[in-house]
């Protein structure tokens, strides 16, 4: 199907663009009353994730309402551990909860062997097909997965954490187990991303939300090594790597076989650009909290960010997911400002 707006794909590939493309991490979610209406009619988050027609509906909402340049399929990174045999619950106001965790070799038997990833996650590929049909080429559709390290954090810890010290302890006390589990996650993730691309995802993003809690060398061994396998395996669509907090690994991330490097709001866009040159597109990175300011401030800060770019190779986004209590009107101001901006180069 021909895309009417392929700006984000051209930007990712470093091709000519007439303006910067813009979308928001976590755009398909709680900031929209229209999302909450669908969500509240159901038993919970998982029912929404697992019902392809409804997942497609909330995926398209931000395209209609916020006029972003890309849709991102409504799902969660935690569908991967679930497909591997560790099911999760999304506890209201608390976040993810896993009944079972993997903290010793003997516990690897909790995982299912030789799973058919496409079959277990067919609700996601079905949602991708329905979304593309309904979008009818208006904007590209982004597929995604968690990076192996971030998924490892949840599979070992069993819930969110500020430090993920259970996960990090294993890296020191049982690196063999860590690599075994990371390997298994990587294999499933590659199959899962291939399935998303086959179903119609036009670009994929890998979220390494907990990259920043590892030291430089540990991130090379337990993070980048597996991201390298994933980025080498995905060849048919542009790949974005968003490794939150991985300040000292930005050059190494840019050396991966990816098209776009995501930056969080603490990162210095200019410094990263100077370090990596023109070889990758950069994505980000307005502080999500900036959208609590009034409209004129949002506009000013967005223009400031755009003025600071020293190259054209950019996809505009926040530095992390949009916070649930942000006024959607502020998001619209952010998006409008980016769309009205005239590129200087
Ligand atoms: O970007 C989008 O709008 C698509 C949907 C999407 C969700 N989760 C839906 C969701 C995406 C891309 C994710 C990714 C995700 N999930 C990440 C990586 C991105 C990041 O924020 O760092 C992580 C770490 C998770 C795991 C997760 N899911 C947590 C920790 C939580 C609870 C905290 C929270 O943000 O609410 C979730 C729940 C979740 N995932 C919600 C949504 C819309 C809220 C649940 C609800 O609506 O009831």
Image: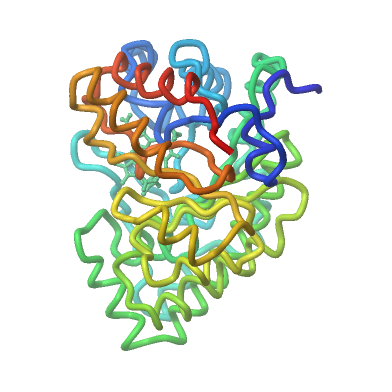
Rendered view: 296 above or below 238: above
Say left or right for 2 vs 50.
right
> Which residue sits furthest front?
344
Say left or right for 333 vs 49.
left
Q: Nearer the viewer, residue 70 or 36?
A: 70
Say left or right for 306 vs 194.
left
Q: Position of residue 317 (x, y in %)?
A: 43, 37
Say left or right for 137 vs 219.
right
> Which residue sits furthest right?
1
Give me the residue at 35% from left, 56% from top. 268
Q: Position of residue 149 (x, y in %)?
A: 44, 66
Q: Position of residue 343 (x, y in %)?
A: 54, 32
Q: Nearer the viewer, residue 277 or 166?
A: 277
- Quarter occupied by the N terminus: top right
Q: Nearer the viewer, residue 192 or 63?
A: 63
Give me the residue at 37% from left, 30% from top. 303
Give me the residue at 80% from left, 22% from top. 2
Q: Position of residue 195 (x, y in %)?
A: 70, 45
- Quarter occupied by the C terminus: top right
């Amino acid at each position: 199907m021909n895309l009417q707006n392929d700006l984000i794909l051209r930007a990712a590939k470093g091709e000519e663009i007439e303006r910067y493309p813009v979308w928001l991490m976590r755009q398909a979610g709680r900031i929209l009353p229209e999302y909450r209406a669908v969500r509240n009619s159901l038993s919970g988050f998982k029912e929404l994730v697992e019902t392809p027609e409804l997942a497609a509906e909330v995926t398209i909402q931000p395209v209609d309402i916020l006029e972003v340049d890309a849709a991102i399929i409504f799902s969660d990174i935690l569908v991967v551990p679930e497909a591997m045999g560790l099911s999760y619950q999304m506890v209201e106001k608390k976040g993810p909860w896993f009944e079972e965790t993997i903290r010793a070799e003997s516990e690897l038997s909790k995982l299912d062997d030789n799973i058919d990833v496409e079959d277990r996650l067919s609700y996601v590929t079905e949602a991708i097909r329905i979304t593309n049909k309904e979008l009818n080429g208006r904007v590209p559709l982004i597929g995604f997965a968690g990076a192996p390290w971030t998924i490892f954090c949840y599979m070992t810890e069993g819930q969110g954490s500020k430090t993920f010290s259970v996960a990090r302890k294993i890296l020191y006390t049982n690196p063999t187990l860590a690599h075994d589990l990371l390997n298994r996650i990587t294999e499933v993730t590659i199959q899962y991303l291939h399935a998303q691309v086959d179903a119609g995802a036009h670009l994929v993003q890998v979220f390494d939300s907990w990259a920043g809690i590892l030291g430089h060398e540990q991130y090379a061994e337990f993070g980048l090594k597996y991201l390298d396998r994933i980025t080498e395996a995905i060849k048919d669509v542009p790949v974005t790597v968003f490794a939150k907090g991985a300040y000292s690994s930005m050059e190494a991330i840019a050396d991966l076989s990816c098209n776009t490097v995501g930056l969080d709001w603490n990162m210095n866009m200019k410094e990263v650009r100077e370090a990596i040159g023109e070889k990758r597109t950069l994505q980000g990175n307005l502080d999500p909290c900036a959208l609590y300011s009034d409209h004129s401030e949002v506009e000013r800060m967005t223009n400031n960010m755009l003025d600071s770019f020293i190259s054209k190779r950019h996809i505009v986004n926040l530095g992390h997911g949009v916070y649930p209590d942000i006024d959607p009107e502020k998001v619209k101001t952010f998006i409008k400002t980016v769309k009205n901006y005239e590129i200087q180069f």
